[in-house]
């Protein structure tokens, strides 16, 4: 093996998470993920802003009534991809490229089936769900239209997010970013055309979202196939005395490179290991959205004006948690690759570096929200809109601005547990988080008003973090590993 070969192989495989300074590796890996997830939020954000400005408050509230449910599916897709990619990352860290390829195709096939099932369920039950959430009658029809169109595109949503997670697992967080920028801009352009030129209203923004996601998913799949082709060559044996064996090995690998990906598409045992991490991760990623969904009926009970203000506030919250969740996902990949390589002490270094990133993000977010909260909420409302809606959104931001550090610490700690495959306590902590949010909102809203919904948020985040932190400090996560 020549001295230049390791550099070539590392550049080809993007295995930057097991080398170099952890702080630098995490930051430059997490940054495209943060930007990408911000653009992910633009799908529904663009829908809300455009209908709010060009159609009216009821249309804005209709999209908002659907938002809690649609965001659950977005987070399920992201969580499913992140969880299943842990297996892929560990195989990459261990240098087992054939198994890594099989894990990718197994994840894609499994989640495609899941997405199609969820799509059919959503199409049949969207009206029942909206009525169960006590959606106001004046926006029920438009909210139902938005949901039905959205559910038609659910397979595209899942496929894109699983594909993006596989890129991330292989150390490439830039390709998903470029694709999200493209699809987000396309979504905005289609929103404007369908709403202002074709007067399609709520239906128009839903159609734009489905089209943008579908095009992005197809492009992502083609790029992933090309990416996997880079792993066709196996590692060459070391030692000058093994030249003939190395040549034969390379010849055999070349013959198999074109067929291995198609021949080994699905592995049931790998799926089992993926499910072990994916289900808790789907819960963890969607905990905020599930919480919003389960307390949606509480907010709906205060009327469409309060719902519009709360919707604007939660849109901003969904943006503010992006750097925290993305940092946690980066920690998960960092942990998985280093666990696969047998470098548990490096995982601890990465965790400390991630906490510093979280503190910096939290200070910046708090300052921006406190300084510009009125302007931010105003961007979602047409001029002269209901004062109740505006004041509700401002009150929400004024409170939640101080607590994003809590979800950041929770996400990074959960990332270590998830990346190592230690999911039992991780799952329990997220369930406690969800229980606190729902219980406080429902029990205290009659006394504290709608503010009880957001008082419950930091309570859940903090409790989740403390439970996961205790597990991390115990060191038992070091004994977990999904591959052998």
Image (spheres, rainbow, N blue to C red):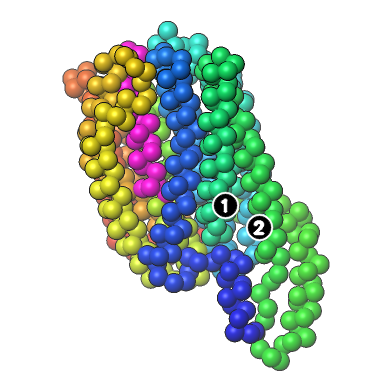
Q: Callout 2 environment at 10 Å: few (<14), some (14 to 19), or many (20+)?
A: some
Q: Name the residue tied to disc 1.
A: 175
Can you name the residue that lies furthest to the bottom here? 241
Q: Residue at x 43, y 48 (%)?
A: 34
Q: Position of residue 438 (x, y in %)?
A: 32, 29
Q: Position of residue 426 (x, y in %)?
A: 38, 49
Quick check: 193 left or right of 475?
A: right
| CB atoms of marks 2 and 1 within 8 Å | yes
Is residue 8 visible in the rendered structure shown here?
yes
Quadrant of the rendering where the C terminus is positioned: bottom right
Q: Is residue 325 magenta?
A: yes
Q: Residue at x 23, y 27 (%)?
A: 395
Q: Position of residue 341 (x, y in %)?
A: 51, 70
Front residue (pair 203, 294): 203
Name the element at disc 2. helix
Q: Name the residue tied to disc 2.
A: 227
Q: Quadrant of residue 446?
A: top left
Q: Is residue 242 above or below residue 165?
A: below
Q: Is residue 319 magenta?
A: yes
Q: Residue at x 43, y 64 (%)?
A: 25
Quadrant of the rendering where the N terminus is positioned: bottom right
Is residue 453 visible in the rendered structure shown here?
no
Q: Quadrant of residue 455?
A: top left
User: Which mark is first along the chain, 1 or 2?
Assistant: 1
Q: Main secondary structure of the magenta part?
A: helix
> Which region is colored magenta?
299-326
Quick check: 68 left or right of 188?
A: left
Spatial distance from mark 2 to mark 1, Cα to Cα?
Answer: 10 Å
Front residue (pair 31, 321): 31
Q: State which mark lies toward you, 2 or 1.
A: 1
């Amino acid at each position: 093996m020549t001295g230049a070969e390791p550099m070539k192989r590392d550049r080809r495989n993007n295995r930057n998470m097991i080398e170099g300074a952890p702080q630098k590796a995490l930051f430059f890996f997490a940054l495209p993920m943060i930007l990408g997830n911000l653009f992910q939020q633009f799908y529904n954000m663009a829908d809300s802003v455009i209908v709010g400005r060009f159609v009216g408050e009821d249309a804005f509230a209709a999209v908002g009534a659907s938002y809690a449910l649609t965001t659950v599916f977005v987070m399920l897709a992201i969580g499913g991809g992140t969880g299943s990619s842990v297996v892929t990352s560990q195989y990459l860290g261990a240098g087992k490229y054939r198994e890594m390829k099989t894990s990718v195709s197994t994840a894609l096939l499994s989640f495609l089936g899941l997405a199609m099932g969820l799509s059919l369920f959503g199409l049949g039950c969207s009206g029942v769900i909206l009525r169960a959430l006590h959606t106001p009658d004046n926006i029920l029809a438009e909210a139902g239209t938005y949901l039905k169109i959205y559910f038609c595109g659910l397979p595209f949503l899942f496929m894109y997010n699983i594909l993006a997670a596989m890129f991330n697992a292989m150390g490439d967080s830039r390709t998903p970013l470029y694709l999200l920028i493209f699809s987000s801009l396309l979504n905005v352009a289609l929103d404007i055309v369908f709403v202002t030129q074709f007067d399609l209203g709520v239906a128009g923004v839903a159609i734009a979202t489905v089209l943008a996601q579908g095009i992005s998913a197809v492009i992502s799949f083609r790029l992933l196939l090309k990416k996997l082709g880079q792993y066709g060559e196996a590692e060459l044996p070391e030692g000058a005395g093994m030249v003939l064996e190395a040549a034969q090995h390379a010849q055999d690998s070349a013959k198999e490179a074109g067929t291995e990906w198609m021949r080994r598409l699905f592995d049931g045992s790998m799926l089992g290991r993926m499910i072990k991490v994916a289900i808790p991760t789907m819960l963890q990623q969607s905990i905020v959205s599930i919480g919003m969904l389960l307390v949606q009926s509480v907010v709906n009970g205060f009327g469409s004006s309060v719902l519009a203000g709360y919707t604007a506030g939660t849109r901003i919250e969904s943006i503010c948690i992006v750097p925290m969740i993305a940092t946690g996902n980066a920690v998960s990949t960092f942990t998985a690759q280093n666990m696969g390589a047998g470098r548990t002490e490096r995982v601890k270094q990465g965790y400390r570096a991630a906490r510093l990133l979280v503190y910096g993000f939290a200070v910046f977010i708090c300052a921006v929200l406190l300084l510009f909260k009125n302007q931010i909420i105003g961007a979602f409302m047409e001029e002269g809109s209901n004062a109740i809606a505006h004041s509700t959104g401002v009150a929400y931001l004024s409170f939640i601005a101080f607590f994003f550090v809590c979800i950041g610490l929770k996400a990074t700690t959960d990332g270590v547990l998830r990346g190592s495959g230690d999911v039992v306590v991780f799952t329990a902590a997220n369930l406690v988080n969800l229980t606190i949010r729902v219980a406080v909102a429902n029990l205290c809203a009659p006394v504290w008003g709608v503010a009880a919904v957001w008082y419950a948020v930091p309570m859940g985040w903090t409790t989740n973090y403390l439970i996961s932190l205790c597990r991390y400090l115990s060191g038992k996560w070091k004994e977990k590993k999904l591959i052998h």
